[in-house]
Image: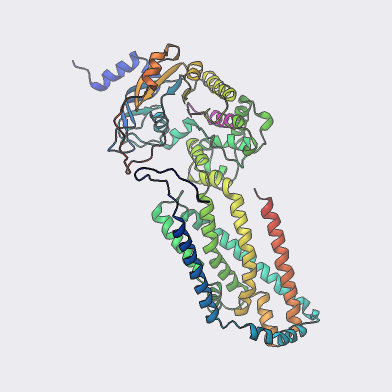
């Protein structure tokens, strides 16, 4: 008797460890402009629970778009995209409740300047509290406790009442990390979290991210430019080039040939200016 | 000296080449000429006459001399009508702030779809365009004399301006924190409360206080058409040639306006 395609896929996923996967992509394509080549063209990609993944690649390779796709800011044009068991494909409606299970750390921190450290972190739990009561500033004790615990985790207890606009860049990124910890996210997406920080702070922040991901068994996917930092703080590296995965392996196996494959520029015909092209935020 | 710009081959979008000097001078001279013509047109149309003004100085002095000493027997009327003026301004501003908050959100392009934001902006522009005195006359003839039509006129007229200011403040809110809240699973009302109001709250408060100052001054005029407040008594005493009483009311109005302005400026300065 011949096995159905779906059954075959299930058997394959169990054999390859994909049953533990939090993100899986098959033939996923995404365009900002239909007349141009896809910004993302991923044949097959699986990321498992608790993995610490660094996405590297030249500017415009599709790193930010990949994170935006996972976070639901953009929808794929074709292919199968499954996140935390939910189909996020072309036709399926992504449930709103999925948002709170995926935390996002931004390059520019995206804190609310006038709010205190505690408020910024507590508001990470907005998806978990009663919406009506929260509008009047009422948060249950357990949520406040979770926020305080997250602040302690990132060593900012002494700044808890400080307004966000009085903090340094490193402290702001720590607040952003505490916000996703308070959110109890199962996946943390970090889009170039260190590009606005000096090298010492960058090391510090990636160390913190990697550490919390390991301790809480949270999947971490971070876009970084520096391959040395990616190797130091991630278990696995995905190299993107022109929207395609050109490297996907353990971080310690990354060598100079791989880096050339990922970063070395291709010889291209001269660009023709296309005024109809949509803006690609990954550029 | 004009900046030297290296020659660029072909058309390069985004780089504006400076106009040649002669074109620049002609352009400037043309602008000045237009300005002079417009001012001259306005002058002739308004019968402005310096000689007439100088000749009227003795009559002005006579008018002012009849105002002194101010008549303090109207103290009770002054207190009551000043209180009413402030009440109209406060409640009119409050009503306007409520309406402006809703209309401002509907008009803000970053949270409302264009099919909704654009008509709301047009509606606010229409409200701004109707003179407050016309609204007051309309409400006096429909709901009767007193402070009530004053409140309605002030609320409606200032919603046109305040709604526009609120919409602009909301549009200027940083999008990043809103994305972060969205990512945390916040719904629309939570995004507005925590993402927008927290960011633009001081701007909204500053705009409201500024509008309150304007409303207080406009309320004085509303009294002239019977829409309550101290303006009604000023007109009443002027018609009865009781200039000493007008003087008392004028002094009180001056003190009130300056005081409210100082308090408002002090509060606005503290908002950040």
Determine whether, in the image, residue A139 is placed left or right of residue B17: right
| Residue shown at the point (33%, 41%) measured from the top left | A277
**Percent position (x, y) of residue B7?**
40, 44
Among all residues in the image, which is located at the extreme top? A253
Foreground of the two, A283 or B195 = A283
Q: What number of labels is visible?
A: 0
**Above or below, B225 relative to A163:** below
**Above or below, B268 relative to A209:** below
Query: Which of the 4 quarters of the picture holds residue B8?
Result: top left
Foreground of the two, B19 or A131 = B19
**Percent position (x, y) of residue A270?**
30, 33
Q: Is residue A189 magenta?
A: yes
Among all residues in the image, which is located at the extreme left? A1
Q: Is residue B16 magenta?
A: no
**Above or below, A229 relative to A93:** above
Q: Which residues are magenta?
A: A173-191
Foreground of the two, B108 or B81 = B108
**Percent position (x, y) of residue B235?**
66, 82
Determine whether, in the image, residue B54 is placed left or right of residue B42: right
**Above or below, A237 relative to B255:** above
Query: Which of the 4 quarters of the picture holds residue B123?
Result: bottom left
**Percent position (x, y) of residue A103?**
49, 31
| Residue shown at the point (46%, 62%) measured from the top left | B27
């Amino acid at each position: 008797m011949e096995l159905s395609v779906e059954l075959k896929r299930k058997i394959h996923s169990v054999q390859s460890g994909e049953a533990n996967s939090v993100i899986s992509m098959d033939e996923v394509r995404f365009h900002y402009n239909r007349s141009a080549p896809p910004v993302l063209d991923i044949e097959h990609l699986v990321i498992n629970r608790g993995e610490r993944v660094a996405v590297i690649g030249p500017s415009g390779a599709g790193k930010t778009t990949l994170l935006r796709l996972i976070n639901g800011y953009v929808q794929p044009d074709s292919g199968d995209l499954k996140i935390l068991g939910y189909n996020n494909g072309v036709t399926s409606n992504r449930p709103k409740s999925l948002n709170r299970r995926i935390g996002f750390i931004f390059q520019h921190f995206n804190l609310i300047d006038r709010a205190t450290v505690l408020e910024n972190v507590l508001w990470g739990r907005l998806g978990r509290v009663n919406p009506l009561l929260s509008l009047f500033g009422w948060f249950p004790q357990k949520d406040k406790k979770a926020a305080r615990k997250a602040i302690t985790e990132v060593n900012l207890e002494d700044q808890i009442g400080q307004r966000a606009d009085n903090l340094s860049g490193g402290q702001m990124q720590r607040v952003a990390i505490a916000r996703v910890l308070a959110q109890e996210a199962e996946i943390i997406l970090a889009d170039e979290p260190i590009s606005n920080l000096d090298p010492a702070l960058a090391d510090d922040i990636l160390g913190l991210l990697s550490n919390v991901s390991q301790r809480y068994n949270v999947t971490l996917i971070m876009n970084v430019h520096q391959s040395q930092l990616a190797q130091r703080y991630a278990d696995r590296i995905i190299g993107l080039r022109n929207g395609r995965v050109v490297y996907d392996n353990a971080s310690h196996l990354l060598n100079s040939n791989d880096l050339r494959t990922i970063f070395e520029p291709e010889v291209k015909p001269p660009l023709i200016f296309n005024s109809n092209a949509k803006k690609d935020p990954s550029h | 000296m004009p900046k030297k710009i290296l020659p660029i081959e072909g058309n390069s979008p985004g780089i504006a080449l400076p106009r040649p000097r002669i074109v620049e001078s002609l352009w400037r001279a043309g602008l000045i000429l237009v300005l002079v013509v417009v001012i001259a047109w306005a002058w002739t149309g308004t019968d402005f006459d310096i000689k007439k003004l100088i000749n009227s100085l003795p009559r002005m002095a006579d008018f002012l001399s009849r105002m002194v000493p101010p008549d303090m027997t109207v103290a009770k009327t002054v207190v009551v009508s000043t209180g009413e003026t402030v009440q109209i301004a406060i409640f009119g501003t409050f009503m306007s702030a409520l309406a402006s908050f809703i209309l401002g959100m509907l008009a803000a392009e970053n949270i409302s779809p264009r099919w909704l934001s654009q008509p709301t902006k047009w509606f606010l522009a229409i409200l701004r365009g109707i003179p407050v005195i016309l609204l007051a006359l309309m409400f006096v003839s429909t709901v009767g004399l007193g402070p009530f039509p004053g409140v309605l006129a002030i609320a409606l007229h200032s919603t046109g301006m305040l709604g526009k200011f609120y919409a602009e403040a909301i549009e200027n809110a940083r999008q990043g924190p809103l994305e972060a809240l969205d990512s945390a699973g916040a719904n629309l009302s939570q995004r507005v409360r925590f993402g927008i109001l927290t960011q633009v709250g001081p701007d909204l408060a500053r705009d409201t206080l500024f509008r309150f100052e304007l409303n207080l001054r406009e309320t004085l005029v509303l009294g002239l058409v019977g829409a309550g407040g101290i303006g009604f008594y000023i007109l009443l005493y002027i018609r009865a040639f009781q200039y000493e009483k007008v003087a008392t009311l004028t002094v009180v109005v001056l003190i009130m306006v300056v005081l409210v302005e100082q308090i408002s400026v002090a509060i606005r300065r503290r908002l950040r």
